Amino acid sequence: MSNNSAKLTIGDESWDLEVSPGSVGPSVIDIAALYKNTGHFTYDPGFTSTASCESKITYIDGDEGTLLYRGYPIEQLANQGDFLEACYLLLYGELPTKAQKDDFVQRVTYHTMIHEQMSRFFTGFRRDAHPMAIMVGTVGALSAFYHDSTDISDPHQRMVASLRMIAKMPTIAAMAYKYHVGQPFIYPRNDLDYASNFLHMCFAVPCEEYKVNPVLARAMDRIFILHADHEQNASTSTVRLAGSSGANPFACIAAGIACLWGPAHGGANEAALNMLAEIGSVDRIPEFIKRAKDKNDPFRLMGFGHRVYKNYDPRARIMQKTTHEVLAELGIRDDPLLDVAIELEKIALNDEYFIEKKLYPNIDFYSGITLRALGFPTTMFTVLFALARTVGWIAQWKEMVEDPSQKIGRPRQLYTGYAPRDYVPISQRR
């Protein structure tokens, strides 16, 4: 048997399966014809050992703590670039030249406004509606207003739809926030950069001038970069699965937002902040540390460790620095919750139990603290995640649509229900 094949043996029969290497990371065993050749499916709940697609966008090495966008380490992109540069990279595969960057920024900037009739959508929601519920509805409705960019077979329309979503998502997110807190909508400004414009739309009010703090804008931009894409996670896989049916891009992104809303996915930073609130004060930390170490106690420290990263989450290193920059800039002195977070961070980074089990603070821990310091309520955390992840979803959707081998997604199952049985008339049932 050659090095580029694997042998599967079931009983007395054997089959050779092709092994395809990745440019980085593990190889995959091609089982596309498995059922046809053997009459068997594979069983992999959660698809943790199954490659659902071939992609050139993002690579993660959880053991080494590595995250690459198109081959570039996340640390370099977050520290040296900006979000729209990362967007261009994810969409087109290469970092832009100065001319390409200027053109891309202009095209995004001049698409930030939404159709004026869309503002009426917001008034249809209850005043206490969750911002993510508003996001799912309004993003899905974009196809009703921009039906000139829903033909996925047209490369130009795909490009226009991509730009529209990257540009309009901050406006929609800010409007969801303003509606949530009962303030008037603030329109986007073309003289502000992407992150500054978003902060202005969220926190400006008509009755006074609002100046965006550049330190806070840079922190917001960095949060967007760190959350822009993360390989084939649940929401990205949802976008790809929806897109495989030929659904329009706005519907696909709305599906991704709905999936992200789940507390096991996009709600992790909100859960981390809720945990800090449960702890309440620094003097109660030892009690909760003890509970976290007790295998018989259901309590778990949220925001520590990661399903994929068995080493330190590379995004968390950057977010840690950003968090402390924001706290120093704002000079927050009397927030008990942030005091708890800072002390808990110190313990987790030095306690042998956490080090041995590699329960390092992850990006959700730091981003939750930072977003709270910036002034966002916890209900907005997942909305900001969706805003940042939109470009990753679009890049993954675009790659899938342009893949000639793409097929409609159709997972199989291990059926364990009843075997065939006969219908019994209702008069004879007991």
Image (cartoon, helix red, strand yellow):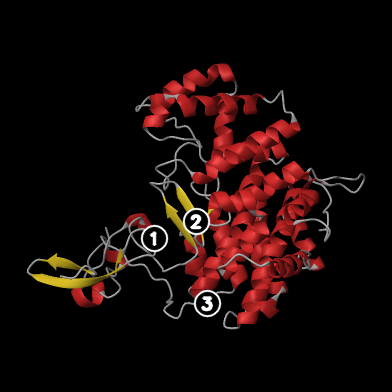
Which label's residue is closer to the chain start, 3 or 1? 1
Asked whether the viewer can see residue 383, the reply is: no
Q: Which residue, given by chain and number where applicable, does mark 1 sit on?
A: 24
Which residue corresponds to the image point at 32% horizontal and 63% vertical from the top-left?
A: 27
Residue 50 is situated, as x and y percent measured from the top left of the image, at 34, 61
Where is 9 relative to 387, above or below?
below
Q: Are marks 1 and 2 in contact (CB under 8 Å)?
A: yes
Can you give x and y, in whole percent of width and height, for residue 397 in the image? 53, 69
Amino acid of disc 2: Leu
Q: Quadrant of residue 19?
A: bottom left
Residue 257: percent from left, percent from top = 58, 58
Checking the image for residue 53, the label placed there is none
For residue 135, above or below residue 147:
above
Which is more N-terminal, label 2 or label 1? 1
Q: Residue at x 73, y 65 (%)?
A: 105
Residue 292 sits in quarter? top left
Q: Which residue is mark 2?
A: 68
Q: Residues within 10 Å of mark 3 (few under 14, many from 20)?
A: some
**Identity of the residue furthest to the bottom in this view:** 154
From the image, tell me which residue sits under label 3.
246
Q: Position of residue 178 (x, y in %)?
A: 77, 49
Q: Amino acid at mark 3?
A: Gly
Label 3 vs 2, first from the N-terminus: 2
Horizontally, is 327 left or right of 38 in the view?
right
Label pair 3/1, CB-CB below 8 angstroms: no
- Position of the N terminus, as image quadrant, is bottom left
Q: Nearer the viewer, mark 3 or mark 1?
A: 1
